[in-house]
Amino acid sequence: MLVCGIDVGAGNVSAVILQDGDVISYCVVTSGEEGATISRKVVDEALRKTPFGFDDVQYLVATGCGRSSVPFAHRQSTEVVCQAKGALYLLPSVKTVINLGTESSRVIRIGENGKVEAFTKNDKCAAGSGLFLETMSTILEIPVELMGNLSLESNGYEEVSSICAVFAESEVISHIHRGVSRDHILVGLHKAVADRILEILGVANVKSDIMATGGVAKNMAIVKELEQRVGLEITVPPEPQIVGALGAALLGQDKVS
Amino acid sequence: MLEQFRQYHLARHQNARVWKEQSGSQVLGTLCCCVPEEIIHAAGILPVRIMGEHEETTEADIHFPTNLCPYCKSCFDQALKERYDYLDGLVIPNVCNMIKAMYGFSKLLLKTPYIRFLEVPQRLSDQGVDYFTKELRRFKESLEDFVGKPILDEALHHSIDVYNESRTLLEKVSELRKKSPPVVSGSEVQEIVLSSMLMPKEEHNRLLAGLLDHIEERDDPPEAGVRLFVSASILDDTDLFALIEECGGMVVADDMPMGSRYFFGQVDSNSEPLRALADRYLNKIACPRKMLPEERLNFATDRMLDADVKGTIIHNMRACDSHLYEYPLLRQQLESQGLPVLFFRGEETETEKEQQRADIEAFIEMLED
């Protein structure tokens, strides 16, 4: 049985191919094209690494904010349910999923029965999202994928106090002008991002095990900062950007079986 | 027939102008459900509830900072754009800091001839009712001066009867939301409730009584959805309810000032009218500004009786302090009853609609899973 999950997010589109419950291929590409075109491309790309073609896929579930733009999907499902399902597959004991996406960050609480109990999202604010990090990457002239490690290697930090992405940008620029070392600014930025995530995490009620998903979860400086502040270990799967698509594929598998 | 309520609400300004021209009487705008409309009605005046609009504020932005209550700001913006130019007066109660400030702004910036600040006690007590009764007497006297004739006790008794009938009918139609399969949708009931704050009460009662006679035989009943409870600070239109229905949900009970708090609890028609009004408007409206949390939250829980709700949406307008302070307690109480909660901090504009849609879809899928 071949099923596919596709996650059309604000920054990336990802697809996961499941064969009889096992992940046999996946693909992540940057969004940018019209939803129907890019989603077909990413599915074809994922299938290219398998002996199967598009017509062999029995069921396809679309998730993500652009899920309605996938004309060939048999079913749509929300990010909350798909993230939870994907995370549970990877870590059956997971109780809290911190999904850190391009435009939104959300925390999903999973009950003992494996069902979603509650979820919270960032409050109309870009600070704390992947887009915020991308903007800062441009200003600091540091590739976004290097930001985490550079920050972890730093021996000091410069506070970025603004809670607004726009104000934080001008604060960072004035730090640069004052000659503050860029790795120190990065540490400050990551602490500020962690602050925003902690606001929605509700630290007092956070339950272990915790998994971080989404592109921002690749930034280990943010994950380490969160671990330190919450006092609990956070698991990051090897490919955190495909958890939503994986959950969608698992939903498809449930439907077919 | 349901369409009549919606149309009246949509064309509310034009309808008020026509009523005014035909009756030769006055129209007074009110803010908040703690203004005893019966006294205004007894003076031969049409009370209409001030509502905002889903449009960017422009005129109000000249005068006020951005971090004010979006509902109040939108109402004021509408007034400054002269959409309420037919109003002969405004009754502004002392319910929250922002509405209180609206009194000052209105005096300063509007040309409305009669602007009355209504003192409302902060706590529920016998002394509070005594005080509010005296304040309602002063309010009645000021209306008498304004219209140039006395408001007789017979007229007050009659108005109380008309309003009690309205509250009975609104309670009946709102209870029909709880039926399974549904007889009437949450957004339809909300249209009826909102139009009752705008239309002459006798007319509304006549239409609603007629609707209730036949509603259970309707051939176009709404589709069933995931049963939800909505608690809100201010929702002055039916958009959120309609959005919930588009996402596969159905509001079957509510706790809102522009919802069931408006029509819950009768005025004792056998008592001295002003004291009876003071008692109902002070003691029976479950507002977090007056009631301590335990009493307030009991009201919310009671509204859910027999509603078989699966989840709750709490919508608090940004900057609505009294509701926002209560939110953690309400959330805790609902979750302890096994009811998941989705929370929105609302705006008056439509900018957040798609964000809300995404969250409601996820919430409903979560409840169905």
Image (cartoon, rainbow, N blue to C red):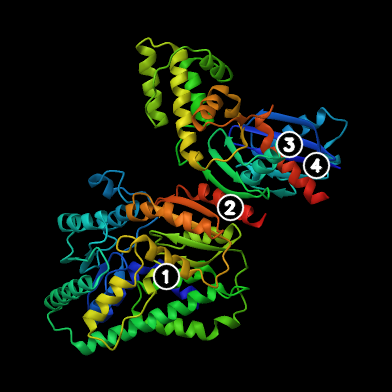
Instruction: Work out whether mark 2 precedes mark 1 in sequence or the reverse, and give the earlier one.
Output: 1
Q: Which numbered mark, 1 or 3, is in the foreground of this view?
A: 1
Res. A51 visible in picture: yes
The quadrant in which residue A185 appears is top left
Q: Nearer the viewer, residue B306 or B220?
A: B306
Q: Nearer the viewer, residue B132 or A174?
A: B132
Q: Badge 3 is on which residue? A: A40
Q: Chain of mark 4?
A: A
Q: Is residue B339 left or right of residue A36?
A: left
For this orientation, the residue located farthest to the front is A231
The quadrant in which residue B291 appears is bottom left
Q: Are marks 4 and 1 on the same chain?
A: no
Decide: few, some or many residues near mark 3? Use Cα within 10 Å; few <14, some 14-19, many ≥20.
some
How many tags in the picture? 4
Q: Which numbered mark, 3 or 2, is in the foreground of this view?
A: 2
> Helix or strand or loop: what does disc 2 sit on?
helix
Q: Badge 4 is on which residue? A: A3
Q: Badge 1 is on which residue? A: B260
For the residues marked 3 and 2, what is the alpha-carbon distance in whole angstroms?
28 Å
Q: Badge 2 is on which residue? A: B363
Decide: few, some or many residues near mark 2? Use Cα within 10 Å; few <14, some 14-19, many ≥20.
many
The x, y position of residue A20, in whole percent, is 85, 40
Decide: few, some or many residues near mark 4? Use Cα within 10 Å; few <14, some 14-19, many ≥20.
many
Task: Say which residue appears at 31% left-offset and 72% top-offset.
Answer: B283
Badge 4 amino acid: Val
Q: Which numbered mark, 3 or 4, is in the foreground of this view?
A: 4
The quadrant in which residue A52 appears is top right
Badge 2 amino acid: Phe
